[in-house]
Amino acid sequence: MESDRAPAASPVAADSSLAADPGIAGSGVDNAAVAAELTAVIVAVTDGQPRVLTIDGGEALPSGPFEPGHRSLQAGLRSWVETQTHHPLGYVEQLYTFADQDRKRGTIGRMVSVSYLGLTREAPVVAGWDAAWQPWYRFFPWEDVRAGVGLGDASLTSALADWAESSRDPLARRDRRRRITINFGLGEQRWNEELVLQRYEMLWEAGLVVEGRQAAPLSATLSGASGEPMRHDYRRILATGIARLRAKIKYRPVVFELMPPGFTLLQLQRSVEALAGRLLHKQNFRRLIDQQDLVEETGDVTTETGGRPAKLFRFRGEVVAERRVAGTKLPLVREV
């Protein structure tokens, strides 16, 4: 299913290293052709840390071309993910189709990427494609505001302010200030965890991420604050996936795709907090889970929490068939 809110368009740096993209080199696509790439944003939550499955040492997402032998787009995606990572896919939904005019890879005239969001539980992956699970905040450190609200790194805040004032056009300066305030939850504006793509694209526009640099490299300070880069526009695709999931956990019980068969309510809360990058109000969160009748006790307890034994719960899968889970906002901790 296509996203009902299209990502804002932004330039994507062309990269001539076509052979570095697994599955695309040697595909026989010439300059006049349009090639279709299948890209997967595969997410897991492990020990309260949201993680994404990557290849090539974290520089790319699992991907490959749609080939004549694939019976469907999703079948092709599953084939590439299992080939590159040996990780079978569970829940998958179409994320977005990226077809910007300047999406070019080396000798390919136009590249269309059909992306998918997959939710799973972390399992070992094959090393042949340098596949690995990476914390997604490695790529978007500013998105984790569990320790505070808004941009936590002063160097990034200062660099954005300098960029806003660098325009000679007073209207452009005012527009930049307004967008920074809204996107990054500064001043009187509240942080909106769903604006992941808008924040990344603003940093791209300001030249504060490696992918958006046209000249001198970033300073060491800014480089650390702006996250690890990825090849081509994979980080943009990942930002879109994070935004989709953050929105989706508010109205559909997809978080349970990431949970083990038995879990404590605290583990469930920590997983939701990890995905949202926000802290939740404990009592309100448990009241919400109880009101929607989403879980039931397994009858077992665990002592792994470090304190007194905690009850284990499981997801009531039949709740989806019984009724559509009511939309709700996350019970966030009050901002101060």
Image (spheres, helix red, strand yellow):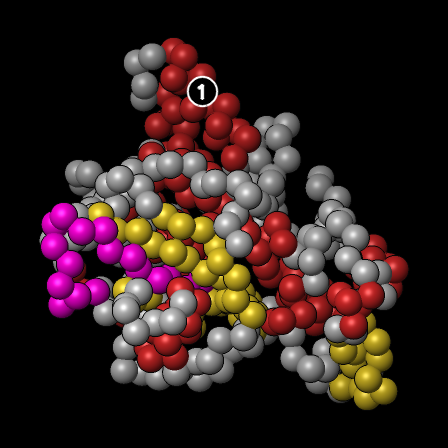
Residue 318 placement (x, y as % from top left) = 78, 72
- Quarter in which the C terminus is drawn: top right
Q: Is residue 265 magenta?
A: no
**From where the camera sits, is residue 199 visible?**
no
Relative placement, left or right, of 255 versus 203 is: right
Instruction: Name above or below for residue 4 compared with residue 35.
Output: above
Of 45 and 249, nearer the camera is 249
Q: Amino acid at mark 1?
A: Asp
Q: Is residue 260 visible?
A: yes
Q: Position of residue 319 (x, y in %)?
A: 80, 68
In the rendered structure, the answer to whether residue 232 lies left or right of residue 333 reads: left
- Residue located beneath label 1 in the image: 175
Residue at the image position 65 percent from the left and 79 percent from the top: 260
Instruction: Examine the image and state in which quarter residue 139 appears.
Output: bottom left
Please determine whether, in this image, residue 330 is positioned above or below residue 91.
Answer: above
Magenta extent: 24-41
Tell me which corner region of the image, top left, top right, bottom left or bottom right, holds residue 66.
Answer: bottom left
CA neighbours of label 1 inside 10 A, class few (<14), some (14 to 19), many (20+): few
* Helix, strand or loop status at disc 1: helix
Residue drawn at x 72%, y 78% as measured from the top left:
263
Q: Residue at coordinates 51% horizontally, 78% vertically from top-left?
A: 122
Tell how many labels.
1
Could you tell whether 124 is left or right of 246 in the image?
left
Q: Quadrant of residue 249?
A: bottom right
- At horizontal 72% and vertical 82% (from top left) the residue drawn is 262
Q: x and y percent of residue 52 in the render?
A: 45, 66
Q: Is 26 inside the magenta-drawn segment?
A: yes
